Amino acid sequence: MSSPQARRRLRSARLALAATLLVTAAVVVLGAVLSASGLFESVAAVLAVVLGTVAVWIVHSGLVLARREATADRARQAQGYRELTEARTRENSEFIAAMQTRTSRAEGAVTELESAVVASQGRAADAMRRLTAEERRAELAETEGSRLAVALEDSEERAAEAIVRVAELEDENGVLRTENDVLRSDLDAASWQPHVKHA
């Protein structure tokens, strides 16, 4: 591939050559007209046509060559753009696949975290229910304990009163036994003694 500068020089040389041929044809035709020779004018006319044709061919071939080079350059650019587009498409596909993988992982992690949060909330609710139930039981136990403490005090007081009453009853029982023993002895003594009749 020739460089753009070399192509420009070649194009300039072609145009200069074509212009030189046209100027030469014009000078020959002008010389033939001034010479007023029919043969010379005919030769000059043929030569002018040939030089003009060569000049047109040089310009045309330069134009065709420039178009071919431009077409080849556009084709190279298109190929470069196509390769660049394919590379970008590949990179984009890889990026999309990587992002989908990361998104899937993130969604999976979010799902796991949501499940963990729901499970934690369920455990917290159960723990709260158990704590509330335990607090109620503790309150009931405390209330029952207070009631039992009062009942125990009453029972102890009644037991103390009962002990005092038992002691009193035992004393009374002792007194009654003693009286019973005295009465029995009196009765026994009376049953051994002869009955005295009074007048």
Image (cartoon, rainbow, N blue to C red):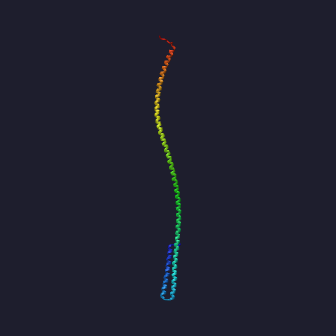
Whether residue 159 is situated above or below residue 81 in the rendered picture = above
Q: Position of residue 128 (x, y in %)?
A: 48, 44
For the image shown, how many numbered marks are present on the structure?
Answer: 0
In the image as oriented, which residue stretches furthest toward the bottom?
37
Q: Position of residue 195 (x, y in %)?
A: 50, 12
Whether residue 5 is situated above or below residue 158 in the rendered picture = below
Q: Position of residue 144 (x, y in %)?
A: 47, 36
Camera-nearest residue between 59 and 12:
59
In the image as oriented, which residue stretches furthest toward the top?
199
Camera-nearest residue between 64 and 117:
117
Camera-nearest residue between 95 and 7:
95
In the image as oriented, which residue stretches furthest toward the front?
199
Q: Position of residue 104 (x, y in %)?
A: 53, 56
